[in-house]
Image (cartoon, rainbow, N blue to C red):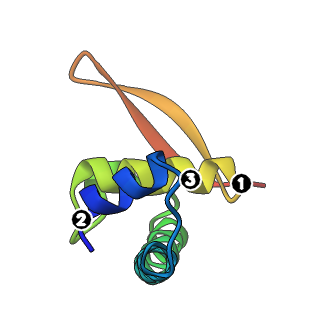
Amino acid sequence: MTRQEFFKAVSENDITPDVIEYALAETTKFEKRNAEKMAEDATLHANIMELVVENNGIKAREVPGVSIQKASSALRTLVNMGKLVSTDEIEDRRVVKFYTLAE
């Protein structure tokens, strides 16, 4: 069954065993991708926490092996979790976030 066939069947309220089987298979795929992403994020968060402890704070561009955008996202998540605190620093007429351990 294709996605188009699935959505058409659902929109027409034609729920057959094939539709249910397809939905369960897709749900399993989503759950697997979610678990992989969560494991990857947990590893990245642990690496960032190690860097912060070693260097008494870091900036997003100092996180090795990931893009600045991904590092910024992970750092914001850690701030929201209460593990880090961000402060603004002026650097070459730009505001750059500096992250340190939360007290």
Return the mark for residue 66: 2
Where residue 41 appears, x then y in whole percent? 46, 72
Sooner in the amino-acid sequence: mark 2 or mark 3: 2
Structural distance between the alpha carbons of marks 2 and 1:
23 Å
Q: Which residue is mark 3?
A: 77
Q: Sequence-wise, which precedes: disc 2 or disc 1?
A: 2
Q: Are marks 3 and 1 in contact (CB under 8 Å)?
A: no
Please, what is the three-letter code of the amino acid marked with disc 3? Thr
Residue type at the position of mark 2: Val
Q: Please name whichever residue, 71 or 11, is drawn nearer the observer in this view of the structure.
A: 11
Q: Is residue 68 left or right of residue 77?
A: left
Q: Can you give x and y, in whole percent of width and height, for residue 83 in the image?
A: 68, 59
Residue furthest top in the image: 93
Q: Which residue lies under the disc numbered 1?
A: 102
Residue 86, compared with residue 54, is above or below; it is above
Give the mark nearest the N terminus, 3 or 1.
Answer: 3
Question: Which is more foreground, mark 3 or mark 1?
Answer: 3
Q: Secondary structure at mark 3?
A: helix
- Look at 42% across and 50% down and name the residue there: 73
Give the quarter of the figure containing the C terminus: bottom right
Q: Residue at x 46, y 46 (%)?
A: 11
Provide residue 80's location: percent of width, then percent of height.
66, 47
* The image quarter in which residue 67 lies: bottom left
Mark 1 belongs to which amino acid?
A: Ala
